[in-house]
Image (spheres, helix red, strand yellow):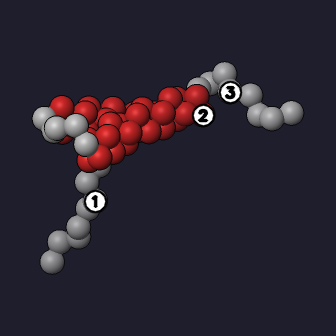
Amino acid sequence: MSARRSPEPTSTFEYRLAQEALNLRQQAKGMPLGIRRTELLRKARQIDAAGEVNKWLTSPGLQPPG
């Protein structure tokens, strides 16, 4: 029996967030106006915000609270 290895990440967290936001926007693009479309677009904006926060938190210039 061989040992199972977990797959290694092939892309960065920021890239995966951006891809997911893009995917949600593409899904919303083909939908009629309504609650589901609004939810998809809201989720895409939240993911964009999460990416910005992550960039800020991982930036080399971030100073600890003093």
In this rendered view, identify the residue nearer to me: 9 or 30. 30
| Pointer 3 residue | 62
Q: Label 1 to label 2, Cα distance in Å? A: 27 Å
Name the side, left or right, on which 65 lies relative to 31: right
**Mark 1 or mark 2: which comes first in sequence?**
1
> Residue 22: percent from the left, percent from the top?
26, 32
Q: Look at label 2 and name its amino acid.
A: Leu
- Residue at screen point 23% across, 70% down: 3
Q: Look at label 3 and name its amino acid.
A: Leu
| Pointer 1 residue | 6
> Residue 24: percent from the left, percent from the top?
25, 39
In this rendered view, identify the residue nearer to me: 4 or 53. 53
Q: Label 2 to label 3, Cα distance in Å? A: 7 Å
Quadrant position of residue 61 = top right
Label ID, residue 57 = 2
SS for dot 3? loop
Number of residues whose C-alpha sits closer than 10 Å to that of mark 2, classed few (under 14), some (14–19) or many (20 or more): few
> Residue 39: percent from the left, percent from the top?
33, 45
Q: Can residue 54 be seen in the rendering of this structure?
A: yes
